[in-house]
Image (cartoon, rainbow, N blue to C red):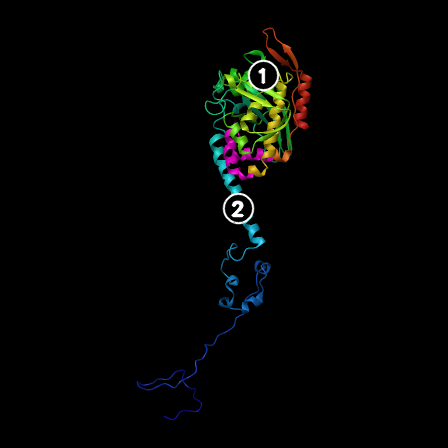
Amino acid sequence: MPRDSNTEDPPYRVYRGGDNPPAQAPQERPYRTYRSAPRGLRARLRGEDDTDLSVADHQRPPTERRGRLRSPFRGPFSWRKGLLILVSAVAFWLLLSLLLFFISASQHAGGDLPAGAQSQLTGGGPMLTSANTVLVLGLDNRPTSGFGSKEPGANTNEKAANTDTIMLWRIGGGVSRRLSIPRDTLVNIPGLGQSKINAAWSYGGPALALKVIKQFTGLQINHLVVVDLANFPKFIDDVGGVTVTTPKICAKIAGGAANGGFTINLSKGSHHVNGETAELLARIRENDPCDPSISDLTREGMQQQILNSIKSQLLSFHTFLHLPWVAWDAPGVVQTDMGGLTMLQMAIAAEIGGSAPVSLLKESSQTLSNGAQVLVPNQGNVHAQVQKLLNG
């Protein structure tokens, strides 16, 4: 049949077997070009624009292909990459330490505070923004194992202990001030009468000790911290020791080393000491024959020096290198009503508030009829010192 000149060729041809189709040059398949919608703000901030669409994805270098994540740690080393690695390592170290701190705090805080204390405490506000009053107590009982456990005649029963350290700490909201109350201060203890303030714990436990201190000072106490002497030296070693300034010391504690106790000798001046020596310095009340003027008031000042030095060490390079160990051991140094988050706020607030000056409640000495040496407080002076603690 003759082909009409106006009829278009069919899109294909049929060949019988044995026929050879004519050779034809391969043709590219037709395609259409579509224009993309304008890039969004996020894409433009990354430096992309509409002209990027003109290059096919498979034609881009591997590092520029869309939809693929590129590891920041691959490729040649540069100072940016080194900085990124350093920042990542520091962040990991801090997060690990924070996790260990909260795990340890959950095991020590709140539940191990002696019964009755919570009823005498008034919950405070967040320490990062508001000032709280924290009572720090150090008991004279000795641990049953480890450093100090072999002292002759030492009391190991916490319930029968005396509060050798009594320190009020006003902390939070940029404030850090402390006031130490001497252990021999004469006060009225309900049920016992006139006695040294340090006897309240042994007579009625932490609840009575808190009640007596609140009545004596007129303060509401938000939180309680009881220092655990068994873990105190280890924590100081974790932070790299402490620096203190002392007079010449040649003191014997618990009968001296020859009798199972301790002997400490230091020249006058500044010393960087380990945890065991720091604990001994915090206990010295007599220093014959080197310096007979050392007394309980001197010891209170030494304890505040040690606390200030611990705070200074928290930002040292040594502490950062040992931060997971510091974080793990810190909650075990104390018994407290505070949870992990509040304890962490207190540590941060202490750094923000700076080093508190040594402040001691000064009183006049007096000998009672039974021969006991006590310190008689002047109520006007007590009120003035408490107001300075609160208001600076």
Q: Is residue 243 visible in this depiction of the protein?
A: yes
Q: Residue sitting at 51 percent across and 38 percent down?
A: 324
State the count of labels: 2
Q: Is residue 346 magenta?
A: yes
The quarter of the image holding the C terminus is top right
Q: Residue 197 carries which label?
A: 1
Q: Could you say where residue 103 lies in the image, as x and y percent from the top left?
A: 47, 36
Please provide percent x and percent y for residue 346: 58, 33
> Does the residue at mark 1 contact the one at mark 2 (Cβ under 8 Å)?
no
Task: Give the image location of residue 212, x and y in percent.
Answer: 58, 18
**Residue sitting nearer the eye, 377 or 165:** 165
> Quarter of the image holding residue 40?
bottom right
Q: Nearer the viewer, mark 1 or mark 2?
A: 2
Graded by Cα atoms within 10 Å as few (under 14), some (14 to 19) or many (20 or more), the crowding at tag 2 reads: few
Q: Which quadrant: the N terminus?
A: bottom left
Residue topped by disc 2:
89
Q: List the single residue furthest toward the left.
A: 17
| Residue found at the far bottom of this picture | 2
Rendering coords of residue 232 (x, y %): 53, 27
Q: What's under tag 2, amino acid-wise?
A: Ala
Q: Is mark 2 on a helix, strand or loop?
A: helix
Q: Can residue 180 be seen in this view?
A: no
Q: Considering only order in the chain, which callout, 2 or 1, is on the residue closer to the N terminus?
A: 2
Q: Is mark 1 on a helix, strand or loop?
A: helix
Q: Which residue lies furthest to the top in this view?
A: 369
- Name the main secondary structure of what is drawn in magenta: helix
Q: Give the range drawn in magenta.
A: 320-349
- Relative to 37, residue 124 above or below: above
